[in-house]
Amino acid sequence: MKILVIGGGGREHTLVWKLAQSPRPTKIWCAPGNAGIANETLKSNNSKVECIQIGAEDLKTLLEFAQNNEVDLTVVGPDNPLAMGIVDKFQAIGLRAWGPTQQAAQFESSKIFSQEFMDRNGVPTMKSASFQSPSEAKSFAAELGGKCAVKADGLALGKGVLICNSTDEANVAIEQIMTDRTFGEAGASVLVQELITGTEISLHALCDGKTAKLFPSSQDHKRALENDLGLNTGGMGTYSPVPFLKEDKLHEIANTVLEPWLSGCTREGIDFRGMIYPGIMLTDDGPKVLEFNARFGDPETQVYLPRLKNDLVDLLEASIDGTLNEHELQWTDQSAVCVVMASGGYPNDYEKGKVISGIEAADAISGVKVFHAGTTIKDNKIVNSGGRVLGVTALGDNLLAARNLAYKAAAMIHFDGAFSRKDIAAKAL
Ligand code: GLY
Protein backbone atom coordinates (compact mmCIF):
# COMPACT_ATOMS: atom_id res chain seq x y z
CA MET A 1 0.00 0.00 0.00
CA LYS A 2 1.29 3.47 -0.94
CA ILE A 3 0.50 6.40 1.37
CA LEU A 4 0.86 10.15 0.86
CA VAL A 5 0.78 12.38 3.96
CA ILE A 6 0.11 16.07 3.40
CA GLY A 7 1.74 18.67 5.64
CA GLY A 8 5.14 19.32 7.13
CA GLY A 9 4.80 20.07 10.83
CA GLY A 10 5.05 18.18 14.09
CA ARG A 11 1.60 16.66 13.63
CA GLU A 12 2.59 15.25 10.25
CA HIS A 13 5.89 13.90 11.58
CA THR A 14 3.91 12.07 14.27
CA LEU A 15 1.38 10.76 11.73
CA VAL A 16 4.16 9.54 9.41
CA TRP A 17 6.08 7.94 12.33
CA LYS A 18 2.95 6.05 13.43
CA LEU A 19 1.89 5.04 9.91
CA ALA A 20 5.43 3.78 9.23
CA GLN A 21 5.05 1.32 12.13
CA SER A 22 2.17 -0.43 10.37
CA PRO A 23 3.08 -3.58 8.41
CA ARG A 24 0.77 -2.42 5.61
CA PRO A 25 2.46 0.50 3.79
CA THR A 26 5.30 -0.30 1.40
CA LYS A 27 5.90 3.35 0.48
CA ILE A 28 5.20 6.64 2.27
CA TRP A 29 5.64 10.11 0.79
CA CYS A 30 5.13 13.35 2.67
CA ALA A 31 4.43 16.71 1.03
CA PRO A 32 6.34 18.81 1.86
CA GLY A 33 7.56 17.05 5.05
CA ASN A 34 10.56 18.18 7.10
CA ALA A 35 14.03 16.95 8.13
CA GLY A 36 12.68 14.53 10.74
CA ILE A 37 10.06 13.03 8.44
CA ALA A 38 12.74 12.38 5.81
CA ASN A 39 14.60 10.32 8.40
CA GLU A 40 11.74 7.89 9.16
CA THR A 41 11.88 4.28 8.00
CA LEU A 42 9.02 1.92 7.18
CA LYS A 43 8.79 -1.13 9.41
CA SER A 44 7.51 -3.27 6.52
CA ASN A 45 10.58 -3.05 4.29
CA ASN A 46 13.11 -0.63 5.86
CA SER A 47 12.59 1.89 3.06
CA LYS A 48 12.96 5.61 3.87
CA VAL A 49 9.97 7.96 3.88
CA GLU A 50 10.36 10.33 0.94
CA CYS A 51 9.64 14.06 1.26
CA ILE A 52 8.42 15.70 -1.94
CA GLN A 53 8.57 19.42 -2.52
CA ILE A 54 4.89 20.11 -3.06
CA GLY A 55 3.15 22.61 -0.79
CA ALA A 56 0.20 21.42 1.28
CA GLU A 57 -2.07 23.92 -0.49
CA ASP A 58 -0.94 23.13 -4.03
CA LEU A 59 -3.93 20.84 -4.59
CA LYS A 60 -3.47 20.52 -8.35
CA THR A 61 0.12 19.23 -8.08
CA LEU A 62 -0.75 16.98 -5.13
CA LEU A 63 -3.58 15.46 -7.13
CA GLU A 64 -1.34 14.86 -10.14
CA PHE A 65 1.30 13.30 -7.89
CA ALA A 66 -1.21 10.95 -6.26
CA GLN A 67 -2.59 9.91 -9.64
CA ASN A 68 0.80 9.40 -11.31
CA ASN A 69 2.16 7.41 -8.37
CA GLU A 70 -1.01 5.37 -7.78
CA VAL A 71 -1.26 6.45 -4.15
CA ASP A 72 -3.70 4.19 -2.28
CA LEU A 73 -4.35 6.46 0.70
CA THR A 74 -3.77 10.20 1.19
CA VAL A 75 -3.79 11.46 4.78
CA VAL A 76 -4.39 15.19 5.18
CA GLY A 77 -2.82 16.85 8.23
CA PRO A 78 -3.49 20.64 8.14
CA ASP A 79 -6.78 22.53 8.05
CA ASN A 80 -6.20 24.70 5.00
CA PRO A 81 -6.16 21.97 2.31
CA LEU A 82 -9.26 20.48 3.98
CA ALA A 83 -11.02 23.84 3.83
CA MET A 84 -9.99 24.12 0.17
CA GLY A 85 -11.75 20.82 -0.56
CA ILE A 86 -8.79 18.50 -1.10
CA VAL A 87 -10.74 15.42 -0.02
CA ASP A 88 -13.61 16.19 -2.43
CA LYS A 89 -11.15 16.72 -5.29
CA PHE A 90 -9.33 13.43 -4.62
CA GLN A 91 -12.58 11.50 -4.22
CA ALA A 92 -13.97 12.98 -7.45
CA ILE A 93 -11.31 11.10 -9.42
CA GLY A 94 -11.55 7.91 -7.36
CA LEU A 95 -8.60 8.48 -5.00
CA ARG A 96 -8.94 7.61 -1.31
CA ALA A 97 -8.22 10.55 0.97
CA TRP A 98 -8.65 10.72 4.73
CA GLY A 99 -10.13 13.87 6.28
CA PRO A 100 -13.47 15.70 6.18
CA THR A 101 -14.95 17.02 2.94
CA GLN A 102 -15.08 20.77 2.35
CA GLN A 103 -18.64 20.92 3.70
CA ALA A 104 -17.73 19.01 6.87
CA ALA A 105 -14.46 20.93 7.32
CA GLN A 106 -16.56 24.09 7.81
CA PHE A 107 -16.67 23.22 11.51
CA GLU A 108 -13.15 24.67 11.52
CA SER A 109 -13.01 26.86 8.42
CA SER A 110 -16.13 28.91 9.23
CA LYS A 111 -16.51 29.99 12.80
CA ILE A 112 -19.97 31.34 12.01
CA PHE A 113 -21.12 28.02 10.49
CA SER A 114 -19.84 26.25 13.57
CA GLN A 115 -21.47 28.66 16.02
CA GLU A 116 -24.85 28.54 14.29
CA PHE A 117 -24.67 24.72 14.13
CA MET A 118 -24.02 24.58 17.88
CA ASP A 119 -26.88 26.96 18.63
CA ARG A 120 -29.29 24.92 16.45
CA ASN A 121 -28.25 21.56 17.87
CA GLY A 122 -27.85 22.22 21.58
CA VAL A 123 -24.06 21.88 21.72
CA PRO A 124 -23.07 23.85 24.84
CA THR A 125 -21.05 26.96 23.97
CA MET A 126 -20.68 30.66 24.82
CA LYS A 127 -23.03 33.55 24.03
CA SER A 128 -22.09 34.81 20.62
CA ALA A 129 -23.30 36.44 17.44
CA SER A 130 -21.95 37.16 13.98
CA PHE A 131 -21.91 40.51 12.25
CA GLN A 132 -21.20 42.07 8.89
CA SER A 133 -21.46 45.57 10.32
CA PRO A 134 -18.79 47.00 12.66
CA SER A 135 -21.30 49.15 14.56
CA GLU A 136 -23.59 46.18 15.34
CA ALA A 137 -20.57 44.11 16.38
CA LYS A 138 -19.51 46.92 18.73
CA SER A 139 -22.99 47.14 20.32
CA PHE A 140 -22.99 43.40 21.05
CA ALA A 141 -19.45 43.59 22.47
CA ALA A 142 -20.63 46.43 24.73
CA GLU A 143 -23.54 44.23 25.97
CA LEU A 144 -20.89 41.69 27.03
CA GLY A 145 -19.07 44.46 28.93
CA GLY A 146 -16.28 44.33 26.33
CA LYS A 147 -15.10 40.94 27.68
CA CYS A 148 -15.13 39.02 24.44
CA ALA A 149 -13.21 37.27 21.70
CA VAL A 150 -13.51 38.88 18.27
CA LYS A 151 -12.93 36.29 15.54
CA ALA A 152 -12.54 36.82 11.82
CA ASP A 153 -14.73 34.36 9.96
CA GLY A 154 -13.21 32.15 7.31
CA LEU A 155 -9.59 31.21 6.92
CA ALA A 156 -7.12 33.36 8.80
CA LEU A 157 -4.35 30.77 9.18
CA GLY A 158 -5.28 30.26 12.81
CA LYS A 159 -4.56 33.87 13.60
CA GLY A 160 -7.88 35.67 13.33
CA VAL A 161 -8.80 35.89 17.02
CA LEU A 162 -8.38 38.94 19.26
CA ILE A 163 -9.11 38.73 22.99
CA CYS A 164 -10.57 41.86 24.57
CA ASN A 165 -11.11 42.85 28.18
CA SER A 166 -12.89 46.20 27.78
CA THR A 167 -15.27 47.96 25.41
CA ASP A 168 -12.39 50.11 24.13
CA GLU A 169 -10.30 47.03 23.33
CA ALA A 170 -13.27 45.38 21.62
CA ASN A 171 -13.88 48.47 19.47
CA VAL A 172 -10.23 48.53 18.37
CA ALA A 173 -10.28 44.79 17.61
CA ILE A 174 -13.45 45.10 15.52
CA GLU A 175 -11.95 48.01 13.57
CA GLN A 176 -8.71 46.08 12.98
CA ILE A 177 -10.47 43.00 11.69
CA MET A 178 -13.42 44.52 9.80
CA THR A 179 -12.13 47.89 8.59
CA ASP A 180 -8.33 47.50 8.38
CA ARG A 181 -8.67 43.82 7.31
CA THR A 182 -5.63 42.87 9.38
CA PHE A 183 -6.46 39.22 8.67
CA GLY A 184 -7.49 39.82 5.08
CA GLU A 185 -10.91 39.17 3.59
CA ALA A 186 -11.73 36.74 6.42
CA GLY A 187 -12.59 39.95 8.32
CA ALA A 188 -15.64 40.76 6.17
CA SER A 189 -17.69 39.13 8.91
CA VAL A 190 -16.82 38.62 12.54
CA LEU A 191 -18.01 36.50 15.40
CA VAL A 192 -18.12 38.22 18.78
CA GLN A 193 -18.05 35.68 21.61
CA GLU A 194 -18.46 35.97 25.36
CA LEU A 195 -15.20 35.25 27.24
CA ILE A 196 -15.63 32.43 29.70
CA THR A 197 -13.28 31.27 32.42
CA GLY A 198 -12.31 27.79 33.48
CA THR A 199 -9.85 25.08 32.50
CA GLU A 200 -9.27 24.41 28.83
CA ILE A 201 -8.82 20.86 27.54
CA SER A 202 -8.66 19.24 24.11
CA LEU A 203 -10.99 16.46 23.03
CA HIS A 204 -10.45 14.37 19.92
CA ALA A 205 -12.83 11.88 18.33
CA LEU A 206 -12.23 9.89 15.17
CA CYS A 207 -15.39 9.79 13.10
CA ASP A 208 -16.75 7.76 10.20
CA GLY A 209 -20.02 9.58 9.55
CA LYS A 210 -21.96 7.49 12.11
CA THR A 211 -19.59 6.74 14.98
CA ALA A 212 -17.32 9.05 16.98
CA LYS A 213 -14.51 7.16 18.76
CA LEU A 214 -13.28 9.26 21.66
CA PHE A 215 -9.54 9.68 22.26
CA PRO A 216 -8.17 10.14 25.80
CA SER A 217 -7.98 13.63 27.33
CA SER A 218 -5.12 16.01 26.63
CA GLN A 219 -4.21 19.59 27.39
CA ASP A 220 -2.31 22.10 25.27
CA HIS A 221 -0.44 25.22 26.44
CA LYS A 222 -1.28 27.91 23.91
CA ARG A 223 0.55 30.97 25.26
CA ALA A 224 4.21 31.51 24.47
CA LEU A 225 5.42 32.00 28.04
CA GLU A 226 5.20 30.29 31.42
CA ASN A 227 2.07 30.80 33.55
CA ASP A 228 0.02 31.28 30.38
CA LEU A 229 1.52 34.68 29.66
CA GLY A 230 2.65 36.10 26.34
CA LEU A 231 1.15 35.81 22.90
CA ASN A 232 -1.05 33.01 21.60
CA THR A 233 0.85 30.36 19.66
CA GLY A 234 -0.01 27.21 17.76
CA GLY A 235 0.71 25.32 21.01
CA MET A 236 3.86 25.14 23.15
CA GLY A 237 3.37 21.71 24.71
CA THR A 238 0.86 19.04 25.60
CA TYR A 239 0.31 16.09 27.88
CA SER A 240 -2.07 13.15 27.97
CA PRO A 241 -3.99 11.91 29.85
CA VAL A 242 -5.18 14.81 32.01
CA PRO A 243 -5.02 13.40 35.58
CA PHE A 244 -7.82 15.56 37.01
CA LEU A 245 -10.29 14.11 34.48
CA LYS A 246 -11.16 10.55 35.37
CA GLU A 247 -12.54 8.27 32.67
CA ASP A 248 -16.22 8.63 33.69
CA LYS A 249 -15.98 12.44 33.81
CA LEU A 250 -14.31 12.50 30.40
CA HIS A 251 -17.14 10.42 28.95
CA GLU A 252 -19.73 12.65 30.60
CA ILE A 253 -18.11 15.72 29.03
CA ALA A 254 -17.82 13.99 25.67
CA ASN A 255 -21.48 12.96 25.77
CA THR A 256 -22.57 16.49 26.59
CA VAL A 257 -20.66 17.79 23.56
CA LEU A 258 -20.31 14.98 21.03
CA GLU A 259 -23.79 13.43 21.24
CA PRO A 260 -25.64 16.59 20.20
CA TRP A 261 -22.87 17.32 17.67
CA LEU A 262 -23.17 13.88 16.02
CA SER A 263 -27.01 13.91 16.08
CA GLY A 264 -26.89 17.38 14.55
CA CYS A 265 -24.59 16.13 11.78
CA THR A 266 -26.99 13.26 11.04
CA ARG A 267 -30.03 15.55 11.07
CA GLU A 268 -28.38 18.10 8.78
CA GLY A 269 -26.83 15.56 6.39
CA ILE A 270 -23.21 16.33 7.30
CA ASP A 271 -21.19 13.16 6.71
CA PHE A 272 -18.16 13.87 8.92
CA ARG A 273 -15.36 11.37 8.29
CA GLY A 274 -12.13 12.50 9.89
CA MET A 275 -11.03 13.91 13.23
CA ILE A 276 -13.25 16.27 15.18
CA TYR A 277 -11.27 18.16 17.80
CA PRO A 278 -13.32 20.44 20.02
CA GLY A 279 -11.48 22.85 22.30
CA ILE A 280 -13.44 22.65 25.55
CA MET A 281 -13.64 25.03 28.52
CA LEU A 282 -14.61 23.30 31.76
CA THR A 283 -16.68 25.96 33.54
CA ASP A 284 -18.80 26.03 36.70
CA ASP A 285 -21.79 25.67 34.35
CA GLY A 286 -20.39 22.55 32.69
CA PRO A 287 -18.28 22.01 29.58
CA LYS A 288 -18.54 24.55 26.76
CA VAL A 289 -17.12 24.31 23.26
CA LEU A 290 -14.68 27.13 22.50
CA GLU A 291 -14.17 26.05 18.90
CA PHE A 292 -14.20 23.01 16.67
CA ASN A 293 -11.19 21.88 14.67
CA ALA A 294 -11.60 19.33 11.89
CA ARG A 295 -8.17 17.67 12.03
CA PHE A 296 -5.65 16.26 14.48
CA GLY A 297 -4.35 18.86 16.96
CA ASP A 298 -0.75 19.97 16.93
CA PRO A 299 0.92 19.22 19.37
CA GLU A 300 -1.89 16.98 20.71
CA THR A 301 -1.05 14.35 18.06
CA GLN A 302 2.47 14.12 19.50
CA VAL A 303 1.09 12.88 22.84
CA TYR A 304 -1.76 10.77 21.44
CA LEU A 305 -0.09 8.61 18.84
CA PRO A 306 2.77 7.33 21.03
CA ARG A 307 0.02 6.09 23.40
CA LEU A 308 -2.13 4.51 20.67
CA LYS A 309 -1.71 0.74 20.32
CA ASN A 310 -3.90 0.27 17.22
CA ASP A 311 -2.59 0.28 13.68
CA LEU A 312 -3.28 3.82 12.45
CA VAL A 313 -3.67 2.71 8.81
CA ASP A 314 -6.55 0.42 9.88
CA LEU A 315 -8.23 3.20 11.85
CA LEU A 316 -7.97 5.83 9.10
CA GLU A 317 -9.34 3.36 6.56
CA ALA A 318 -12.22 2.51 8.90
CA SER A 319 -12.89 6.23 9.27
CA ILE A 320 -13.20 6.52 5.49
CA ASP A 321 -15.22 3.30 5.09
CA GLY A 322 -17.70 3.84 7.91
CA THR A 323 -16.53 0.77 9.86
CA LEU A 324 -15.11 2.32 13.02
CA ASN A 325 -17.67 0.38 15.09
CA GLU A 326 -15.57 -2.74 14.31
CA HIS A 327 -12.55 -1.24 16.11
CA GLU A 328 -11.79 -0.73 19.78
CA LEU A 329 -9.25 2.03 20.43
CA GLN A 330 -6.48 0.82 22.69
CA TRP A 331 -4.06 3.03 24.62
CA THR A 332 -1.04 2.44 26.82
CA ASP A 333 -1.55 3.33 30.47
CA GLN A 334 1.57 5.47 30.23
CA SER A 335 1.49 9.25 30.21
CA ALA A 336 2.98 11.32 27.43
CA VAL A 337 4.40 14.85 27.57
CA CYS A 338 5.48 16.95 24.59
CA VAL A 339 7.68 20.03 25.11
CA VAL A 340 7.85 22.30 22.08
CA MET A 341 11.20 23.96 21.34
CA ALA A 342 10.59 27.18 19.42
CA SER A 343 12.71 29.71 17.52
CA GLY A 344 13.71 32.86 19.45
CA GLY A 345 11.04 35.52 18.84
CA TYR A 346 8.21 33.14 17.93
CA PRO A 347 5.27 33.76 17.48
CA ASN A 348 6.64 37.05 16.12
CA ASP A 349 9.58 37.22 13.68
CA TYR A 350 12.44 34.83 14.22
CA GLU A 351 15.67 33.94 12.46
CA LYS A 352 15.92 30.78 10.43
CA GLY A 353 18.89 28.60 9.50
CA LYS A 354 20.23 28.04 13.04
CA VAL A 355 22.05 24.71 13.29
CA ILE A 356 20.39 22.29 15.72
CA SER A 357 22.53 19.87 17.72
CA GLY A 358 21.73 17.05 20.13
CA ILE A 359 18.64 15.60 18.46
CA GLU A 360 20.19 12.17 17.93
CA ALA A 361 21.34 11.87 21.54
CA ALA A 362 17.92 12.96 22.86
CA ASP A 363 16.13 10.53 20.52
CA ALA A 364 18.34 7.70 21.73
CA ILE A 365 16.91 7.89 25.28
CA SER A 366 14.44 5.06 25.82
CA GLY A 367 10.87 6.46 25.87
CA VAL A 368 11.80 9.68 24.01
CA LYS A 369 10.86 10.67 20.49
CA VAL A 370 11.80 14.04 19.00
CA PHE A 371 9.17 15.07 16.48
CA HIS A 372 10.31 17.71 14.01
CA ALA A 373 8.08 20.65 13.07
CA GLY A 374 10.01 23.58 11.53
CA THR A 375 13.25 21.91 10.44
CA THR A 376 15.06 21.49 7.17
CA ILE A 377 18.48 20.37 5.94
CA LYS A 378 21.07 22.99 4.95
CA ASP A 379 24.68 22.08 4.11
CA ASN A 380 24.01 18.59 5.49
CA LYS A 381 22.96 19.99 8.86
CA ILE A 382 19.52 20.18 10.48
CA VAL A 383 18.48 23.83 10.86
CA ASN A 384 15.33 25.60 12.06
CA SER A 385 12.92 26.75 9.35
CA GLY A 386 9.75 27.49 11.32
CA GLY A 387 8.51 29.00 14.59
CA ARG A 388 7.79 25.73 16.33
CA VAL A 389 10.88 23.66 15.64
CA LEU A 390 10.72 20.41 17.62
CA GLY A 391 8.24 18.56 19.83
CA VAL A 392 10.33 16.66 22.35
CA THR A 393 8.02 13.88 23.51
CA ALA A 394 8.42 11.30 26.24
CA LEU A 395 6.38 8.41 27.61
CA GLY A 396 6.57 7.57 31.30
CA ASP A 397 4.77 5.40 33.82
CA ASN A 398 3.13 8.52 35.20
CA LEU A 399 2.91 12.17 34.27
CA LEU A 400 5.84 13.23 36.45
CA ALA A 401 8.13 10.57 34.94
CA ALA A 402 7.10 11.53 31.39
CA ARG A 403 7.59 15.21 32.13
CA ASN A 404 11.02 14.72 33.68
CA LEU A 405 12.12 12.63 30.71
CA ALA A 406 10.82 15.14 28.13
CA TYR A 407 12.69 17.99 29.84
CA LYS A 408 15.85 15.89 30.23
CA ALA A 409 15.78 15.20 26.47
CA ALA A 410 14.97 18.83 25.58
CA ALA A 411 17.98 19.99 27.65
CA MET A 412 20.25 17.97 25.34
CA ILE A 413 19.11 19.88 22.23
CA HIS A 414 20.58 23.26 21.30
CA PHE A 415 20.21 25.96 18.69
CA ASP A 416 20.70 29.72 18.86
CA GLY A 417 17.64 31.44 20.28
CA ALA A 418 15.82 28.20 21.21
CA PHE A 419 13.20 28.51 23.92
CA SER A 420 10.56 26.31 25.48
CA ARG A 421 8.06 26.72 28.28
CA LYS A 422 9.32 25.23 31.52
CA ASP A 423 5.86 24.55 32.93
CA ILE A 424 4.33 22.05 30.50
CA ALA A 425 2.07 19.75 32.55
CA ALA A 426 3.20 21.49 35.76
CA LYS A 427 -0.28 22.50 36.88
CA ALA A 428 -1.57 18.96 36.43
CA LEU A 429 0.95 17.75 38.99
N1 GLY B 1 -3.36 22.55 19.60
C1 GLY B 1 -3.75 23.64 18.81
C2 GLY B 1 -4.20 23.29 17.46
O1 GLY B 1 -3.92 22.23 16.96
O2 GLY B 1 -4.89 24.09 16.85
Image (spheres, rainbow, N blue to C red):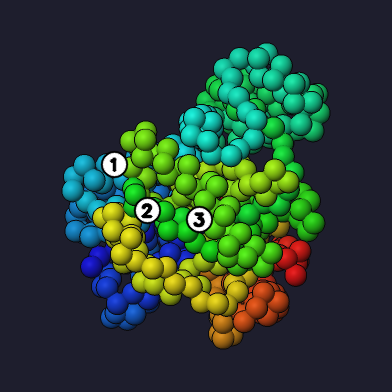
Position above or below: 110 against 376: above
- Quadrant for residue 172, please give it: top right
What residue is rendered at 54% in x and 64% in y? 216
Check whether the beta carbons of the residues at disc 3 and disc 2 lie within 8 A of each other.
no
Q: Amino acid at mark 1?
A: Asp
Residue 266, position in %: x, y?
A: 36, 40
Looking at the rendered image, the quarter that the C terminus falls into is: bottom right
Badge 1 element: helix
* Distance of label 2 from label 1 (alpha carbons): 21 Å
What residue is rendered at 33% in x and 36% in y? 269
Q: Is residue 240 left or right of residue 329?
A: right
- For the residues carrying marks 3 and 2, which lies nearer the camera in this image? 2
Can the viewer see residue 408? yes
Q: Earlier in the sequence, mark 2 or mark 1?
A: 1
Q: Which residue is mark 1?
A: 88
What residue is rendered at 52% in x and 25% in y? 185
Mark 1 closeness class: few <14, some 14–19, many ≥20 residues within 10 Å: some
Q: Which residue is mark 3?
A: 204
Q: Amino acid at mark 3?
A: His
Query: Mark 1 vs ligand 1: CB under 8 Å?
Result: no
- For the residues carrying marks 2 and 1, which lies nearer the camera in this image? 2
Query: Mark 3 vs ligand 1: CB under 8 Å?
Result: no
Badge 2 element: loop
Residue 410, position in %: x, y?
A: 67, 74
Q: Which residue is mark 2?
A: 211
